[in-house]
Amino acid sequence: MARGAFAPAAPVEHVLTLDCPEAPGIVHARAGCSCRAGAR
């Protein structure tokens, strides 16, 4: 690697596990919040 060059960072992976009562829209709401925060 050339001097001053940076190796690409390894991708970071996270898993979100929810434990809550069944309710319509909970996954949609959490996914929307994550997207607004910059998650993909």
Image: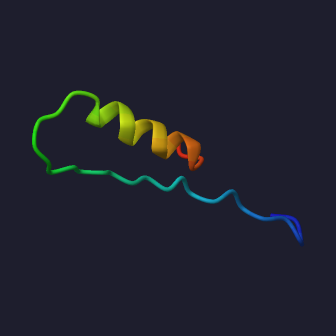
Whether residue 40 can be seen here: no
**As displayed, is residue 38 above or below residue 32?**
below
Spot occupied by residue 23 in the image (x, y as percentages of width and height): 17, 33
Is 32 positioned to the left or the right of 10 in the image? left
* Relative depth, front residue between 32 and 5: 32
Query: Horizontal and vertical percent for residue 18?
Result: 21, 49
Q: Is residue 28 above or below residue 10?
A: above
Picture residue at 14% right of the left edge, 48% below the top = 20
Residue at the extreme right of the image, as rendered? 3
Left or right relative to 19: residue 25: right
Horizontal and vertical percent position of residue 3: 89, 72
Q: Which residue extends farthest bottom? A: 3
Which colouring convention does the figure follow? rainbow
Q: Residue furthest top?
A: 24
Please state, as top left, top right, bottom left or bottom right, where the N terminus lies in the image.
bottom right
Residue at the spot x=11%, y=36% of the render? 22
Which picture quadrant has residue 36?
top right
Compared with residue 38, is residue 28 higher up or lower down, i.e. above or below? above
User: So how many labels did they put on this image?
Assistant: 0
Q: Nearer the viewer, residue 32 or 39?
A: 32
Residue found at the far left of this picture: 21
Q: Is residue 38 visible?
A: yes
